[in-house]
């Protein structure tokens, strides 16, 4: 065991049921960006990300059912690691809407700290039938990783110019440092996007809270209430279609990793936005839906794969930009070792941390 005990400093703020792309709730209010209180750190694990970024705690545990512990760290300039499904036992605690998708996720200022926390909580547990023992680090991959760079994760989505510029500069820096990086996109099945997957979250919420919602919908956050209402209306065939879409995503990414060891892309297509709205109105000069800021993270949950967001530079107003590094399911330790090397190579592009 790496830790015999840990000092719990506090609990980070989150959105209601961890089902919203910014961090606010009726009990504790709004979590604000540490660099600009007018902005949001994103969500849902925004409280944890801000606590680490602002020096309140060296480590934090968030949850990640679609990017909740990768996007907020990207927005505030820290590290967020989403383990493989089953890498961290999760049989004890409150039920969640993302059954089969949500994982416990370390957040830290540096990759080494995230790895330390991960090793303290990872591994098979008899109480959790989904938990698995992970493979040891693949030293061949660490020595010469084959990395694919996909500027938009193979999706037809807009990206803000400042994010695009920061990520391109990071890729150029890694290539100069000797990393073997090839431009390549995953080819996703036709019609598979986040909208096709949304019934799973909505029916999960309806399953857990539908009875309470019927009794008093006004008790819920308005956005969460709308999700529950949609979940009450979805039919079995639509839910089955969403589950199949998730399976096709997993198969596509598994096939992609027969050619490459890692896939890199932006963690988010934009920097932080004002906290009084669900998402930016436009990205890349194009009007987007409220979830337009979240397009690059949910597929990885459906693939059950590990991914980590690393600070890679800054965009407008000096706001942080994140680079997402993804690996095949079960290669968490290998991912963390390569992420540490990438983190070191990117240091010249980053502002100094206090």
Image: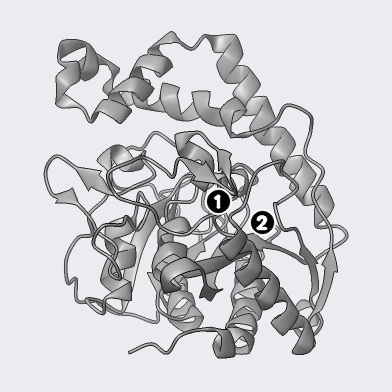
Quadrant of residue 21 within the rendered picture: top left
Q: Residue at x 45, y 52 (%)?
A: 126
Quadrant of residue 224 within the rendered picture: top left
Which residue lies under the disc numbered 1? 85
Residues at marks 1 and 2 touching, judged by CB atoms closer than 8 Å: yes
89 left or right of 347 in image: left
Which residue lies under the disc numbered 2? 329
Q: Which residue is drawn at 43% across and 21% down?
A: 203
Q: How crowded is mark 1: few (under 14 residues within 10 Å), some or many (20 or more)?
A: many
- Residue at the far right: name it: 259
- The local secondary structure at tag 2 comes to loop
| Residue 99 appears in the figure | no
Quadrant of residue 348 within the rendered picture: bottom right
* Mark found first going from the N terminus, 1 or 2: 1
Q: Image height check: is 271 above or below 78?
A: above
Query: How did the renderer colour the structure?
Result: one colour
Q: Residues within 10 Å of mark 2 (few under 14, many from 20)?
A: many
Which one is nearer the viewer's eye here, 200 or 6?
Answer: 200
- Residue at the far left: name it: 27
């Amino acid at each position: 065991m790496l830790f015999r005990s840990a000092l719990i400093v506090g609990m980070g703020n989150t959105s209601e049921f961890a089902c919203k792309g910014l961090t606010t709730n009726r009990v504790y209010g709004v979590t604000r960006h540490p660099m600009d209180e007018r902005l949001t750190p994103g969500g849902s694990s925004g409280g944890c990300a801000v606590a680490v970024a602002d020096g309140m705690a060296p480590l934090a545990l968030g949850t990640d059912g679609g990017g909740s512990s990768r996007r907020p760290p990207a927005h505030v300039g820290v590290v967020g690691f989403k383990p493989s499904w089953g890498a961290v036992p999760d049989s004890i605690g409150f039920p969640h809407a993302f059954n089969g998708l949500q994982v416990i996720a370390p957040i830290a200022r540096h990759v080494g700290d995230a790895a330390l926390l991960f090793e303290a909580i990872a591994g098979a547990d008899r109480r959790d039938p989904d938990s698995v023992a992970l493979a040891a680090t693949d030293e061949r991959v660490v020595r010469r990783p084959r990395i694919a760079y996909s500027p938009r994760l193979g999706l037809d989505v807009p990206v803000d110019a400042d994010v695009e510029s920061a990520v391109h500069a990071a890729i150029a820096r890694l290539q100069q440092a000797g990393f073997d990086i090839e431009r390549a996109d995953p080819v996703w099945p036709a019609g598979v996007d986040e909208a096709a997957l949304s019934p799973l979250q909505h029916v999960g919420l309806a399953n857990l809270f539908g009875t309470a919602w019927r009794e008093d919908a006004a008790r819920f956050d308005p956005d969460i209430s709308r999700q529950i209402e949609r979940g009450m209306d979805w039919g079995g065939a639509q839910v089955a279609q969403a589950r199949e879409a998730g399976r096709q995503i997993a198969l596509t990414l598994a096939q992609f990793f027969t050619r490459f060891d890692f896939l890199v892309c932006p963690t988010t297509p934009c920097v932080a936005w004002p906290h009084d709205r669900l998402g930016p109105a436009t990205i890349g000069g194009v009007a987007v839906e409220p979830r337009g800021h979240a397009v690059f993270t949910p597929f990885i949950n459906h693939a059950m794969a590990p991914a980590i967001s690393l600070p890679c530079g800054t965009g407008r107003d000096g706001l942080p930009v994140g680079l997402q590094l993804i690996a095949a399911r079960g290669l968490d330790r290998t991912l963390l070792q390569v992420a540490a090397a990438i983190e070191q190579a990117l240091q010249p592009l980053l502002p100094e941390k206090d």
